[in-house]
Image (cartoon, rainbow, N blue to C red):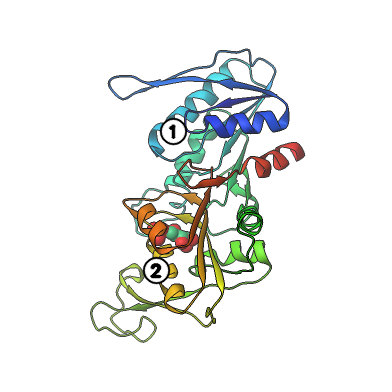
Amino acid sequence: MLVLNGSNSTSLGEKIAIELGIKFENVTTRIFPDGETYVRINTDVNERDAIIVQTMFPNQNNSLMEFLLIADVAKDLGARTIIGVIPYLAYSRQDRKFQPGEALSAKTVATLMKSVGIEKLITVDTHYQHKGHGEFDFFGIKCLNVSAGRLLLDYIKEKLDLDFMTIGPDLGSSEMIKYATGEEMFLTKEKRCPICGKLAQECECKIKKKKYEITEIESKYNFQGKNVVILDDIIASGGTMIKAAKKIKSEGAKKVIAAATHGLFMKDSLIQLKEITDYLIVTDSIMTPVSNVSVAPLIVEVLKKS
Ligand code: R5P
């Protein structure tokens, strides 16, 4: 067995290989001047089981292409099995059609992966059809999705030495919160119609669900004097986490800690979140300046069982 890493996950690939006690092979990759991707595997993979570690942010399209090329050449070189370890799986949120004619991008990604010999995927807190952790069928590929929630909370307990309560910033985080804490505590969003101004549930304009404006975050919890961890799977634009942190702070929380598996931190959301919160932490599923928790132990545990 050996680990082949993509250029987005060099350090994670190395950690996984070290913990498994197997060979780590730095695949040569580069981008040609015209933007195309070059890949070369410099080792013998014939009759070996290959694990390709490649997270898919930043540069989703390039990192997907790189992953496909590594898998295809590993297959051509005679790899026995190929497992894809993709902590952040690009396009997984485009897993259903909202309007006729839309691309079902997650299915296309799975089709491409199958064509280059990927038999199994390991992902972390993938936002795929809101299925939570565990095993699921990713359009024909066996996918094992692990959750980093407990890992993040354990780190906070150990590092910050605080008593805290844990809450999700919205309904979408409820599965992750339940798995990490055994409880389901999350904030809700009040949505209003931009035409009549009424609450979404009272509006009769029948506009598209997505067009309702979020005006207020609702909470039924008491945050006064408490340390609060807001836990989520992903910080993308940062809007969800920023709104939740502001709300909890305004209700008298002592310390607000923002924790998430994937830190995409679009635009200036990293700076904003650092200013609003007392502590900000994500995992190394995507490398950021606040990636203080590694998902390597989670992935190694799963690989040892496979
Ligand atoms: C939603 O259900 C997800 O769990 C995240 O809360 C959401 O995707 C975060 O996105 P953003 O950072 O853009 O608000």
Against 265, residue 206 (above or below) is below
Q: Which residue is mark 2?
A: 243
How crowded pointer 2 is (Cα within 10 Å; few <14, some 14-19, many 20+) is rated as some
In the figure, is residue 215 to the left or right of 227? left
Among the 4 quarters of the image, the one containing residue 71: top right
Q: Position of residue 212 (x, y in %)?
A: 32, 73
Determine which of the numbered discs, if any, sits on residue 63 in the image. Answer: 1
Q: Could you say whether the residue bearing mark 2 is in a helix, strand or loop?
A: helix
Q: Earlier in the sequence, mark 2 or mark 1?
A: 1
- Please state, as top left, top right, bottom left or bottom right, where the C terminus lies in the image: top right
Quarter of the image where ligand 1 sits: bottom left
| Residue lying at the far right of the rendered structure | 305
Determine which of the numbered discs, if any, sits on residue 30 in the image. Answer: none
In the figure, is residue 283 to the left or right of 246? right
- Distance in Å between CA atoms under marks 2 and 1: 31 Å
Q: Position of residue 286 (x, y in %)?
A: 49, 42
